Image (cartoon, helix red, strand yellow):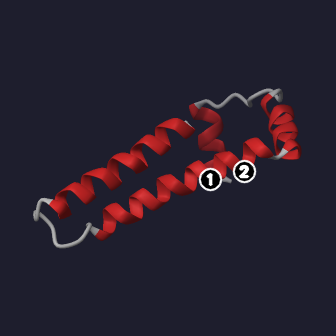
Amino acid sequence: MQLAALSEAERIEISQDGRVKLGMLKEPMPDQVSLRDDFAGIVRLIDLIQSDAVILERLGKLSQLPVPATDAASIEEADDE
């Protein structure tokens, strides 16, 4: 997931820089810059998680918990309450 986020951030930056360089845009599109920053934030978050032993330990414990069964009836009951 980290590599995918990094690749997408780089793709956005390269495409926006190319469009500016070719004169297609005066400046990078703000929504694309924001999206690039979001992907870069995902990369930093994953770096942080991978470098923290406590977080990794907690995630390991959580991944071993059984996943509660969800079916349409139980979802409807929860909605009714």
Query: Mark 2 and mark 1: span between their CA atoms?
Result: 6 Å
Seen in the image, is 57 located left or right of residue 76? right
Image vertical order of residue 40 relative to residue 25, above or below:
above
Which of the two residues, 33 or 73, is positioned nearer the viewer here?
A: 33
Which amino acid type corresponds to the residue marked 1 in the rendered image? Arg
The amino acid type, in three-letter code, at marker 2 is Leu
Q: Quadrant of residue 17?
A: bottom left
Count of labels in the image: 2
- Left/right placement of residue 44 relative to residue 20 reads right
Q: Nearer the viewer, residue 56 or 67?
A: 56
Query: Can you say which quadrant of the picture contains the N terminus?
Result: top right
* 28, 23: nearer the viewer: 23
Place of residue 79 in the rendered image (x, y in percent of width and height, measured from the top left): 61, 50
The residue identified by callout 1 is 44
Question: Which residue is drawn at the image coordinates 83% and 32% (left, top)?
Answer: 60
Q: Identify which residue is drawn at 26% across, 67% down.
A: 29
Q: Which residue is mark 2?
A: 48
Q: Position of residue 16 (x, y in %)?
A: 26, 58
Check contact, mark 2 vs mark 1: CB within 8 A: yes
Identify the residue at the far bottom of this view.
Answer: 26
